[in-house]
Image (spheres, rainbow, N blue to C red):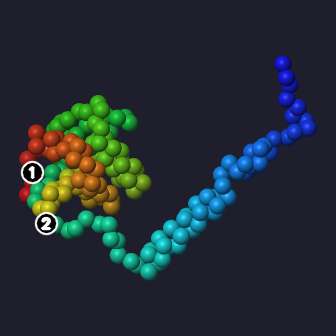
Amino acid sequence: MASIDTQNSPRRPAFKRADQNDMIPLGLVRAMFGLAAITLALVSYASFTGQPKIAVPAQAPIVAEWPLRLIGGDAQSVVVQDIDGRLLADLPHGGFITVVQNGLATMRRRHGIDPTLPIRIVKFENGRLAALDDYTEFRVELTAFGTDNQAAFERLLAANVPAQN
């Protein structure tokens, strides 16, 4: 069995392998840092000069809205209640509804707000569906996550909650 002589050949981290070939080409490393620097410069410029946000959905009148409570159990489960506390759904694997609830809980924890307060699910005239939190700036454009994820909320709403106009 061959032994490794660590005394005469100390291992040091390097950008080159023992055969002197670049593990990561130096040009690629420079390009990655350059891209990061350019991105930082552009975002800083837009922020400091007060440029308007351009990737914001078009404003539209609200057609209907549903106040709901999304209460998380663990990483996958969510309980959905109406504003009066009536159980609408107990989802052990809530999928996208759990993702929205986790995001909401995180935002409310940051602001020190009760996570069981209701959130508004809003349907706009142009067909968009969004989850809006009146207590924080949390907003999820449910339409942006695909038809399956939007349909999860639409099925929940259609089966359980009358819309408030």
Q: Which mark is residue 163?
A: 1
Find residue 41 and report its horizontal and vertical position in percent. 52, 73
The x and y percentages for residue 122 are 18, 56
Q: Position of residue 65 (x, y in %)?
A: 14, 55
- As drawn, the residue found furthest toward the top would be 1
Residue at the image position 85 percent from the left and 40 percent from the top: 10
Question: Residue 107 versus residue 2: which sits nearer the camera?
Answer: 2
Residue 111: quadrant of the picture: bottom left
Mark 1 belongs to which amino acid? Ala
Q: Which mark identifies residue 61? A: 2
Farthest residue, direction right: 8
User: Few, some or many C-alpha atoms within 10 Å of disc 2 (few <14, some 14-19, many ≥20)?
Assistant: few
> What's under tag 2, amino acid-wise?
Pro
Residue 117 visible in this rendered orientation of the protein: no
Q: Give the residue at x 26% y 59%.
A: 134
Q: Position of residue 81 (x, y in %)?
A: 20, 41
Of residues 155 and 69, which is closer to you in this image? Answer: 155
In whole angstroms, how far apart are the C-alphas of marks 2 and 1? 15 Å
- Left or right of 146? Residue 46 is right
Q: What secondary structure is found at the residue carrying circle 1?
A: loop
57 shown above or below 87: below
Name the mark nearer the viewer: 2 or 1: 2
**Residue furthest bottom as drawn:** 49
